[in-house]
Image (spheres, rainbow, N blue to C red):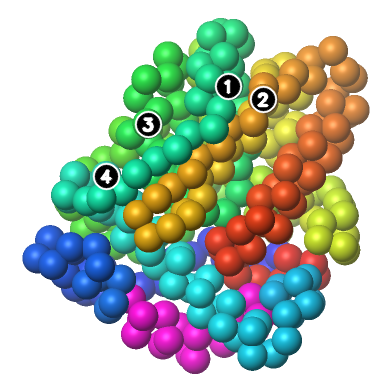
């Protein structure tokens, strides 16, 4: 997947401007500034704009003008999710409200004391739910690709502090696999996205939005190996100040052969993810040709 490098865009100065606006004017002025930044990326971020345009035009059959407009909305919602994360995590006064369908499912998976996999995707803003997870009686680890510029990372940590969740960074030396394995062995929960992969990762072709696409097998292989239960989790923005979080019923695959468990788990996840993408098409933030 050479077109996705796992790198985020932006510079510390740009982040600093938004933080200043947030602290002095609040969320709405920051959203207003974001409109101009969104327009810039729409025009000058050619590769991501092209792939996202094709996503709307080919998968949802939107006409050209509507597809361009949807790309703009997609960029804007991504920017809003970053702003919202800063606001929520740093304690800036806000009007955000939250619904959580399935919080009982997270309590249940934690109560099993078997470890657990929380499968998610690059859709919506699951990180906004972090403060709601404090009541879950299990350590929660979040697997992430460390594609952030060091200057940005240091600046953001100075604003919002270090994550209250334990981060497991995907590294070239594969040490993250041992961290994930240890988390499962210690009956901890691990939250992993399963809609992106790097070259040389094991993948499976699954029908998604009408055409075969490659999905990473790693998360499901680890869950099947350790026999941990699974829940699918998402955090979706439904209005300016309202988020809706979802955690599916807990699924167990330990009674299946390992290869069968991996395939069934992946099929269940792709089916569930497709429902969310169809419901919230503007909130899937995957900026490369997913069907290549």
The range drawn in magenta is 34-54
User: Is residue 216 in view from this perspective?
Assistant: no
Which of pointers 3 and 1 lies earlier in the amino acid sequence? 1
The CA distance from mark 2 to mark 4 is 27 Å
Disc nearer the start of the sequence (4/3): 4
Q: Dot 3: what SS? A: helix
Q: Position of residue 141 (x, y in %)?
A: 46, 30
Frontmost of labels 4 and 3 is 3
Q: Which residue is mark 3?
A: 132
- Give the percent coordinates (x, y) of residue 167: 42, 37
Question: Which residue is painted at 26% across and 41% down in the image?
Answer: 162
Residue 50 located within the stretch drawn in magenta: yes
Find disc 1 in the rendering and name its residue. 105
Under circle 4, the secondary element is helix
Say what secondary structure mark 2 lies in: loop
Q: Residue furthest left?
A: 24
Mark 2 or mark 4, whichever is nearer to me: 2
Q: Earlier in the sequence, mark 2 or mark 4?
A: 4
For mark 2, does the 10 Å Cα neighbourhood hold few (<14), some (14 to 19), or many (20 or more) residues?
A: some
The residue that label 4 is drawn on is 89
Decide if residue 272 is on the left or right side of residue 50. right
Looking at the image, is 131 positioned above or below residue 107?
Answer: below
| SS of the residue under disc 1 | helix
């Amino acid at each position: 997947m050479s077109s996705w490098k796992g790198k985020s865009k932006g510079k510390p100065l740009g982040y600093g401007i938004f933080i200043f606006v947030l602290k002095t004017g609040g969320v709405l002025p920051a959203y207003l500034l974001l409109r101009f930044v969104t327009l810039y990326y729409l025009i000058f971020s050619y590769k991501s704009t092209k792939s996202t345009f094709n996503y709307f035009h080919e998968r949802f059959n939107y006409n050209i003008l509507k597809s361009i407009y949807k790309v703009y909305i997609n960029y804007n919602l991504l920017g809003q999710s970053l702003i919202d994360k800063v606001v929520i995590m740093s304690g800036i006064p806000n009007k955000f409200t939250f619904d959580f369908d399935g919080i009982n499912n997270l309590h249940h998976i934690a109560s099993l004391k078997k470890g657990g996999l929380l499968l998610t995707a690059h859709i919506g803003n699951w990180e906004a739910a972090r403060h709601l997870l404090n009541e879950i009686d299990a350590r929660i680890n979040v697997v992430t690709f460390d594609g952030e510029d060091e200057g940005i990372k240091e600046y953001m940590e100075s604003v919002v502090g270090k994550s209250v969740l334990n981060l497991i960074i995907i590294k070239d030396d594969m040490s993250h696999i041992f961290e994930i394995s240890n988390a499962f062995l210690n009956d901890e929960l691990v939250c992993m996205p399963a809609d992106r992969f790097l070259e040389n990762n094991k993948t499976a072709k699954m029908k998604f939005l009408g055409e075969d696409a490659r999905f990473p097998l790693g998360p499901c292989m680890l869950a099947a190996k350790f026999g941990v239960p699974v829940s699918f989790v998402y955090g979706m923005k439904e209005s300016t100040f309202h988020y809706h979080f979802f955690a599916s019923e807990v699924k167990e695959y330990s009674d299946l052969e390992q290869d069968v468990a991996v395939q069934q788990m992946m099929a269940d996840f792709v089916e569930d993810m497709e429902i969310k993408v169809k419901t919230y098409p503007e909130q899937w933030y995957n900026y490369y040709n997913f069907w290549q």
